[in-house]
Image (spheres, rainbow, N blue to C red):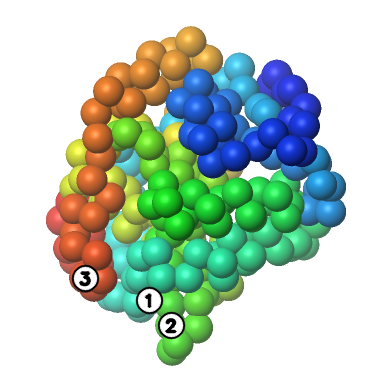
Amino acid sequence: MKARSVPVRSPAITPEIMLRAYAAGIFPMAETADDPGLFWVEPELRGIIPLAGFHLSSRLARTVRSDRFEIRVDSDFEAVIAACGEARPDRPETWINARIRAIFAELFALGHVHTVECWREGRLVGGLYGLSLGAAFFGESMFHRETDASKVALVHLVARLRRGGYQLLDTQFQTGHLAQFGTLEIARDDYRLLLDEALRHRGEWHAWPQGQRVTGREALAEL
């Protein structure tokens, strides 16, 4: 997939610059976890999940309904991003480096970054994190340590976004894993139109009150 990239000078990046970048349709990546530098990416084709057209299999719906995992929101950002940045057999290199972890930690403290986490028997076994701006949510990364944990986290994310009046769920790229949920690839100009419209509105991340335990049935009811 073609993408335009521009090197980022290390001293320049701040939470404010990061938010402006996302509002302009670009996002940062690193070559590897050990690379101290960042570069901006603006794909020609952007992956999105239409919130009104989320695909959910009956098997996954049963797993969500069973409440196999306890869902927590924003309870352990550091653990989530660390897990997302771990090397895996299918992904020996990661684009999440120390600078991304640091800047997203700042944005988390400012209330712009959020997590959806799956816990079981006191262990974090899956989850995701992303950035919220206006009525747009930019999904950054997800992980799982138990079967279906990341998928269940995504279902709860979509339910929360729909309940909170969000208009755009950006997945950055289309992947085989995300395709099963109805991910679309759209051209850069079309994406910018959707983004501009979403930024004119405000999504409510805490449409379910902070700290409230949301059951699988409640999440499915929003879908």
Q: Nearer the viewer, residue 96 or 187?
A: 96
The residue where tag 2 is placed is 120
The residue where tag 1 is placed is 69
Q: Are marks 2 and 1 in contact (CB under 8 Å)?
A: yes
Q: Nearer the viewer, residue 90 or 124?
A: 124
Q: Nearer the viewer, residue 110 or 202?
A: 110
Task: Answer with the quarter of the image where residue 3 lies.
Answer: top right
**Above or below for 22 versus 141:** above
Residue depicted at x 50% and y 64%: 77
The residue where tag 3 is placed is 212
Density class for disc 2 (Cα within 10 Å; few <14, some 14-19, many ≥20) is: some
**Left or right of residue 115: residue 2:** right
Q: Are marks 2 and 3 in contact (CB under 8 Å)?
A: no
Give the CA distance from mark 1 to mark 3.
Answer: 15 Å
Amino acid type at circle 3 is Gln
Density class for disc 3 (Cα within 10 Å; few <14, some 14-19, many ≥20) is: few
Q: Are marks 1 and 3 in contact (CB under 8 Å)?
A: no
Amino acid type at circle 1 is Phe
Direction right: furthest residue? 35
Q: Where does the image place residue 15, in percent across and percent down from the top left?
A: 54, 41
Local SS, label 1: loop
Residue depicted at x 30% and y 19%: 197
Q: Where does the image place residue 59, in percent across and percent down from the top left?
A: 35, 62
**Left or right of residue 75: residue 209:** left
